[in-house]
């Protein structure tokens, strides 16, 4: 019998459903459940296994098991399992291929059509990486649909909806959150506005909060454990699973007890539903903020929503429905199958696509992995290529009504990727270890995921034995809001945040001082005189102990770099350079400073250990700005009067490329995790985006008048551009390079800086003598 297959490849679990004669039903994938763990492990013989078979190895062989892989899709860093290197594409392809094989076995034959789901806020890069996963799994023909559209299709099939009825989908799973507004039309379901998501927020993070509660309730017993003791590894793995079970139990009970078996100790911790709600209330509020912004972009008043449909395993927590209903004034409908709604809707969608392409093909037999002979190093490509054994795909099927030869499932624009911190600082190391060692609980279903711009914590989660991740940054919104202003002196030309985010340093050239602002209070705390001349720009050393201040005057009587000791607020050295120095850059190891000399067509290289000039690199005329790649191997220079961005090989101190851009390139910003450089073109009112893998322009984006500075959000989802001519800030999506917002600022915004945690940004308003504070979470 012909049938359609829908697969929801989630962050923590995978669900599948089949459609026959217009009816959809779930497939049993797991050993004891319809869903299967989204885990992949490598056996001793080098063969990859997935699902529950991999999950069972999480406690005994944690270094051989990878979880939360979908969060890492698009991250080129290999995952090391049992000493062998694997791309994220290969691991996810193994998981998807196994699910497909199990579906074929359970259904007695191959499906006529396969529909895969993905988050609505994925951009082109993530969708291309997802296509590589499908190819690795051996799926030669398939269709794609966004997860909220699939959930909406299931909702429409099980509820009577009126014409033009508007509702929202709130999808909170084990690893991600997605919000979308949709409308029922005579032709089906359409998405309204801009879907938004939070990459690193879901049931796994709530488990972390419960674990933090256990540590606090036991007087810090977890942070005092010997993490080198093998018994500790097993004990923490079991505790993590018990924390997950307790969280799930409180969806039905009002209190529960968590057994805590530690080496030499046995404790019990009581957890009530009220306590759990207090632990997760703030992150839940962040999801409501994301949904509110999505509703605003749809042009819909909250009172116009007929319902908010709750899907995803974590949406079963009673607090979710209570807060959603209270904020939006409409029913919060918990789907009868919240863990399966997306897969069921995808299966229903398979029916409309039946016959549009060839059937999927069974994956080729797996080969044992090759042992890594050295630690895996990050690759530079945005999406790893599938293994050679995988069949070449014919490509995804088009959406209904489209040319079968075209790609289907084009997503909406990008959205933020990180979540508010859930853990107390005292247990960050323990939680990080658990993210590395064990599979995160049972019973969470988490469709979704997003871009690699904030993959630090996720990398550790999928790479057992990796470094403890840094705290996650705040979620950046497509539409940030401008807040109050801070008076900082008459001529604030440039602002930079210290690496620890505690202070802002503002070059006040008219007053001849550097103004210091405490970011905890947003108050000026000091004014540091610069005797050598007017301070124009500054750059911090990686450890924040030094700031390198570009000094020059309009009469061109001085051109130097002053070295500021940030511990004493004293100038400790002055290094003359050839001509007016603009915005410099420090190598990642802090050993070299690259200074663009505007009038001499050179970039000076300074040894920071001795504060002496060691080289001059000739570049096209009037270099304004320098930024280095994360590995320090190349420097990108905006050459203002040459209309090019030049590329310097730092190993040889030579120019190896010149990239034509718009008129009067003024500043550049190198993306920290993607192969991208953005530069502003002052006289072209545009931003050029360069692919650093090829050093070719991939996009040109129109912005406001006379753009002067550009920088990336801390999570890498957006670029912020200050437009001096019309006193605005343009926000550009890193996924599809479109402007998502234009925010008014103070007069003549010359620069913008972002705090390391991504929560706030600051714009220097030259004409107003102020800093405009930006709420980057919207």
Image (cartoon, grey):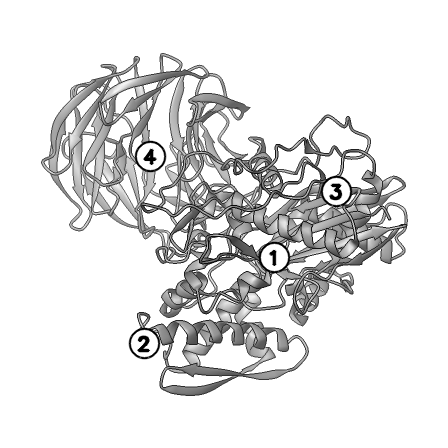
The numbered mark, 2 or 4, whose residue comes first in the sequence reads 2
Tell me the quarter of the picture where residue 106 sits.
bottom right
Q: Tell me the distance, in whole angstroms, between the alpha carbons under discs 2 and 4.
A: 45 Å
Residue at point 46%, 82% (across, down): 260
The numbered mark, 3 or 2, whose residue comes first in the sequence reads 3
- Which residue position is annotated with label 2? 224
Residue 409, placed above or below residue 223? above
Label 3 crowding class (10 Å Cα cut-off): few <14, some 14-19, many 20+? many
Residue 36, placed above or below residue 383? below
The numbered mark, 1 or 4, whose residue comes first in the sequence reads 1
Q: Is residue 734 left or right of residue 33?
A: left
Instruction: Mark 3 vs mark 4: give the one in front.
Output: 3
Q: Tell me the distance, in whole angstroms, between the alpha carbons under discs 3 and 4.
A: 41 Å
Q: Answer yes or no: do the residues labelled 1 and 3 have beta carbons within 8 Å?
A: no
Instruction: Mark 3 vs mark 2: give the one in front.
Output: 2
Q: Tell me the distance, in whole angstroms, between the alpha carbons under discs 3 and 2.
A: 50 Å
- Which residue position is annotated with label 1? 287
The image position of residue 216, as x and y in percent, is 41, 78
Q: Is residue 593 visible?
A: yes
- Which residue position is annotated with label 3? 191
Residue 561, placed above or below residue 644? below
- Which residue position is annotated with label 4? 494
């Amino acid at each position: 019998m012909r049938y359609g297959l829908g697969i929801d490849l989630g962050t923590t679990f995978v669900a599948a459903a089949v459609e026959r004669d217009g009816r959809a039903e779930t497939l049993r994938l797991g050993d004891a459940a319809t869903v299967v763990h989204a885990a992949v492990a490598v056996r001793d013989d080098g063969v990859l296994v997935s699902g529950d078979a991999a999950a069972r190895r999480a406690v005994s062989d944690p270094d051989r098991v990878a979880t939360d892989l979908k969060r890492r899709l698009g991250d080129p860093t290999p995952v090391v399992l049992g000493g062998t290197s694997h791309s994220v594409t290969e691991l996810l392809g193994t998981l998807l291929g196994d699910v497909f094989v199990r579906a074929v076995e359970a259904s007695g034959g191959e499906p006529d059509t396969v529909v895969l789901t993905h988050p609505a806020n994925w951009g082109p890069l993530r969708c291309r990486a997802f296509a590589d996963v499908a190819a690795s799994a051996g799926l030669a023909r398939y269709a794609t649909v966004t997860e909220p559209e699939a959930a909406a299709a299931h909702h429409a099939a099980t509820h009577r909806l009126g014409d033009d009825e508007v509702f929202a989908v709130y999808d909170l799973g084990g690893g991600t959150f997605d919000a979308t507004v949709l409308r029922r039309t005579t032709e089906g379901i359409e998405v309204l506005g801009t879907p938004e998501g939070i990459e690193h927020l879901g049931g796994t993070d709530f488990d972390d909060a419960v674990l933090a509660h256990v540590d606090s309730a036991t007087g810090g017993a977890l942070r005092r454990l010997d993490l080198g003791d093998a018994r500790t590894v097993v004990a923490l793995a079991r505790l993590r699973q018990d924390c997950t079970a307790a969280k799930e139990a409180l969806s039905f009970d009002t209190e529960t007890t968590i057994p805590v078996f530690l080496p030499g100790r046995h404790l019990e911790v009581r957890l009530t539903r009220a306590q759990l709600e207090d632990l997760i209330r703030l992150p839940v509020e962040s999801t409501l903020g994301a949904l509110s912004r999505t509703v605003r972009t749809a042009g819909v008043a909250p009172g116009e929503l007929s319902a908010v449909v709750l899907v995803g395993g974590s949406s079963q927590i009673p607090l979710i429905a209570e807060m959603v209903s209270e904020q939006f004034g409409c029913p919060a409908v918990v789907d009868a199958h919240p863990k399966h709604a997306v897969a069921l809707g995808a299966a229903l969608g398979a029916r409309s696509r039946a016959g549009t392409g060839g059937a999927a093909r069974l994956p080729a037999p797996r080969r044992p992995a090759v042992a890594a002979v050295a630690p895996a190093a990050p690759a530079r490509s945005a999406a790893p290529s599938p293994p050679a054994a995988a069949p070449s795909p014919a490509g995804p099927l088009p959406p209904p009504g489209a040319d079968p030869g075209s790609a289907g499932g084009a997503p909406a624009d990008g959205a933020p990727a990180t979540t508010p911190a859930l853990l107390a600082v005292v247990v960050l190391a323990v939680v990080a270890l658990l993210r590395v060692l064990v599979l995160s609980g049972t019973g969470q279903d988490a469709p979704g995921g997003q871009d690699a711009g904030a993959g630090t914590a996720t990398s550790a989660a999928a790479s057992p034995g990796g470094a403890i991740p840094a705290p996650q940054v705040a979620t950046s919104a497509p539409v940030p809001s401008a807040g109050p202003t801070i008076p900082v002196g008459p001529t604030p030309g440039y602002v930079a945040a210290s690496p620890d985010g505690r202070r802002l340093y503002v070059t006040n050239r008219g007053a001849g001082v550097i103004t210091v602002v405490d970011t905890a209070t947003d108050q000026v705390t000091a004014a540091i005189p610069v005797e050598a001349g007017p301070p124009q720009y500054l750059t911090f050393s990686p450890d924040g102990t030094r700031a390198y201040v570009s000094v020059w005057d309009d009469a061109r009587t001085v051109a130097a770099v002053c070295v500021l000791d940030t511990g004493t607020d004293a100038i400790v050295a002055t290094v003359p350079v050839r001509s007016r120095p603009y915005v410099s850059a420090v190598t990642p190891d802090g050993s070299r400073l690259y200074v663009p000399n505007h009038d001499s067509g050179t970039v000076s290289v300074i040894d920071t250990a001795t504060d002496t000039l060691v080289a001059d690199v000739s570049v096209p005329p009037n270099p304004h700005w320098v930024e280095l790649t994360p590995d320090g191997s190349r420097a990108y220079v905006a050459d203002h009067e040459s209309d090019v961005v030049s590329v310097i090989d730092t190993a040889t101190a030579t120019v190896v490329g010149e990239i034509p851009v718009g008129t009067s390139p003024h500043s550049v910003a190198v993306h920290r995790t993607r192969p991208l450089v953005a530069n502003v073109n002052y006289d072209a009112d545009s931003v050029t985006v360069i692919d650093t893998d090829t050093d070719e322009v991939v996009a040109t984006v129109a912005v406001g008048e006379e753009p002067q500075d550009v920088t990336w959000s801390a999570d890498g989802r957006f670029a912020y551009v200050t437009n001096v001519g019309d006193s605005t800030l343009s926000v550009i999506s890193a996924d599809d390079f479109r402007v998502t917002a234009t925010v008014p600022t103070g007069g003549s915004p010359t620069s913008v800086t972002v705090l390391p945690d991504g929560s706030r940004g600051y714009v220097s308003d030259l004409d107003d003598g102020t800093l405009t504070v930006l709420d980057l979470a919207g």
